[in-house]
Amino acid sequence: MTWYRDGLLHFGLGIENTFIPQERPGERAIDEYALTEHYDQWSDDLGLAASVGAEFMRWGIPWHVVSPERGRWDWSWTDRVMDRFGELGIRPIVDILHYGTPLWIDDQFAHPDYPQHVAEYAARAAERYRDVATDYTPVNEPMLHSLFSGEYAYWPPYRQGTAGLVEIATAIAKGFVLTQRAIADVLGDRATFVHVDASMRYAGDIDAPEHWETARRYAHQGFLVEDLVTGKVDDRHPLSSLLRSRGVSPGLLQWFRDNAVQPDVMGVNYYPRHSTELFEAGVHHGGGFADPRPTRDDGVDGLKEMLRGYAERYGAPVMLAETCVTDDAETRIAWMDASVSAVEQLRAEGTDVVGYTWWPLFDMYEWTYRHSTAPRADHLLSMGLFDLVETPTSLERVRNPVADRFAAHALRSTRPESVLAEASHGMHPRSPERPTPRAVVRREDGLF
């Protein structure tokens, strides 16, 4: 039985894997694996996930590392990590793209061959790791990609306004479609696709004359990339006129409908303190990091609304693909308890919620690091089950009480007979669909 159809609520974790390797004056590269020293501590990091009972791990391949130059591939580091996933029996849900492209792709997402480049990379990864990884996220948060690299001009290729948004969104969407199709060509029916996007909710003075048009657009554009890749954008779509006015041809929209791909699981990222933005009468905010709107914490009500909405819109099982609050351990635990309870309530009411993901396993560094000259410690976000603690030689991972609470929730989600049999021996039970440890067999024919 496919893991997301076994009737259980599966608990997992993520490791932050934002990669923006491009630099320019006043902007330094972001590589979260380097900042958190995951490149060095990968083996122990996955062991930490296993120690708290994680069944799956949302984890991304660093495209800029495995493809440092066009036509050159270096899988040496990811080979070792994938071997470790197999050894531990943790199911990887692999992010193919989690922001950013390799340095050799000029203009990044705006390059005319970007969709083909990302599809080639995806096919090579799927072939190489076919014996341990069958679950893939083609693009994490594609609308945030589109906003930060398009409308906000905050990340490469620094497009701006609605024209930039449409250019980047359609390019990312085309790459998304080709990526999923390339992986499916390699893995066939074994492939599972977990689409993941960020919750975008808007409240406040949305009917104010100065905000009405923008608020109306925002209410729909949060779904734009997912609507494109699933073939939902036609002349009746609320954003069809915007797309046409920004140069999207009827032929391209027809291509999306003809080549539509669907999620097996629809992942929803929800952060209670950030996912609901407020419009204020008489106040203009552009949105995004550079000119943020105020936010409102709508707690579990917002969470349940978003999970229900995505389930209804795309007709697929849903999972909470990222959640947390950045705060002390007590506050994090309170949100974990409340959000787990909300997910369980949705399941009891009939919404097919199949997964819960605390993000991240250990702390991360805020994206503001890119536009700063301050040391990484000044950008630390306390979010994880394990604290990152600076020492003279490395970043230590220090377990905090949030880890214990996550482990308790994960234990409770497994089948009673497993709990009784294995908890009595001090072991964390393996989910019935959690893969058994196995060796990774890779092709060594010079192509992969």
Image (tube, rainbow, N blue to C red):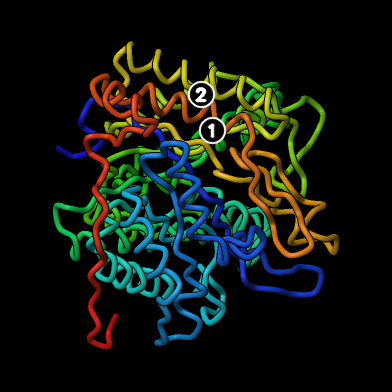
What label sits on residue 442 in the rendered view? none
Please give left or right for residue 313 compared with residue 27 in the image.
Answer: left
Disc 1 packing (10 Å; few <14; some 14–19; many ≥20): many
Q: In the image, residue 437 lies at what x, y percent? A: 27, 53
Badge 2 element: helix
Image quadrant where residue 273 sits: top right
Image mark for residue 303: 2
- Position above or below: 442 against 415: below
Name the residue carrying label 1: 270
Q: Amino acid at mark 2?
A: Leu
Q: Please, is residue 421 above or below residue 252 in the view?
A: above
Q: Quadrant of the C terminus?
A: bottom left
Can residue 384 be seen in the rendering of this structure?
yes
Q: Residue furthest front?
A: 425
Residue 144 against residue 159 in the figure, above or below:
above
Comparing 155 with 440, the one in front is: 440
- How many marks on residues? 2
